[in-house]
Image: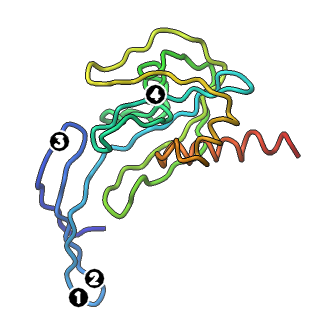
Amino acid sequence: MPTDEELLYTGKRFQVKRATRTRPDGSILQKEVIRHPGSVVIVPIVDTDHVCLIRNFRMAAGRTLIELPAGTLESQEPPLTCAMRELIEETGYRAAVMEELTAFYAAPGMFDEYMHLFVAKDLTPGDAAREPDEEIENLVVPLAEALQMIQRGDICDAKTMIGLLLYYQNYVLPGLR
């Protein structure tokens, strides 16, 4: 863990800091890191064959990506609460069942965002409550098609790839054996 951090920038959802760490040999290591409160990503299972993805314009990528719904944790917010909120905000669906599948670092070479992956089942459709700056559209597809979209490169978002592939591995494959 860094021994010292200097604040360089504070944004709406993250901070950039210069972290300094003394190595065991006594040398000093400095790196700029992004401190993030963490996030959730949700695999919304619409029915036995369909998943709800979203088309989401991403400023950093400069284009619309096909993704799973996701969002940033609010201060002290439990991941389950965030997952339920983000599912409604981005898709309009409400889940009767929300199960955490795993958690992972999004890009640990640069920032400390820790993503909690949930599977949402027994969904009820409703109105989305998207933020004014969001350009999101639901895209309900068969799970098999979503997996093919990964293979074709239509889905190039890592959290979405991880979510769909782990869902398939943990929920679909065991039933095929």
Along the viewing direction, whichever of 32 and 28 lies nearer the viewer? 32
Left or right: residue 108 versus residue 15 is right
Number of residues whose C-alpha sits closer than 10 Å to that of mark 4, classed few (under 14), some (14–19) or many (20 or more) = few
Residues marked 3 and 4 touching at CB (< 8 Å) = no
Q: What distance separates the C-alpha of mark 3 from that of mark 4? A: 23 Å
Q: Mark 2 points at which residue?
A: 23
Residue 97 on image: x %, y %: 63, 24
Residue at 48% across / 35% down in the picture? 66
Q: What distance separates the C-alpha of mark 2 from that of mark 4? A: 38 Å
Question: What's under tag 1, amino acid-wise?
Answer: Gly
Q: What distance separates the C-alpha of mark 3 from that of mark 2? A: 30 Å
Q: Name the residue under label 1.
A: 26
Which sits earlier in the primary sequence, circle 1 or circle 3? 3
Question: What's under tag 2, amino acid-wise?
Answer: Arg
Residue 48 on image: x %, y %: 74, 25
Colour option used: rainbow
**Residue 11, numbered label:** 3
Number of residues whose C-alpha sits closer than 10 Å to that of mark 3, classed few (under 14), some (14–19) or many (20 or more) = few
**Residue 74, numbered label:** none
Residues marked 2 and 1 touching at CB (< 8 Å) = yes
Residues marked 4 and 1 touching at CB (< 8 Å) = no
Residue at 46% across / 9% down in the picture? 127
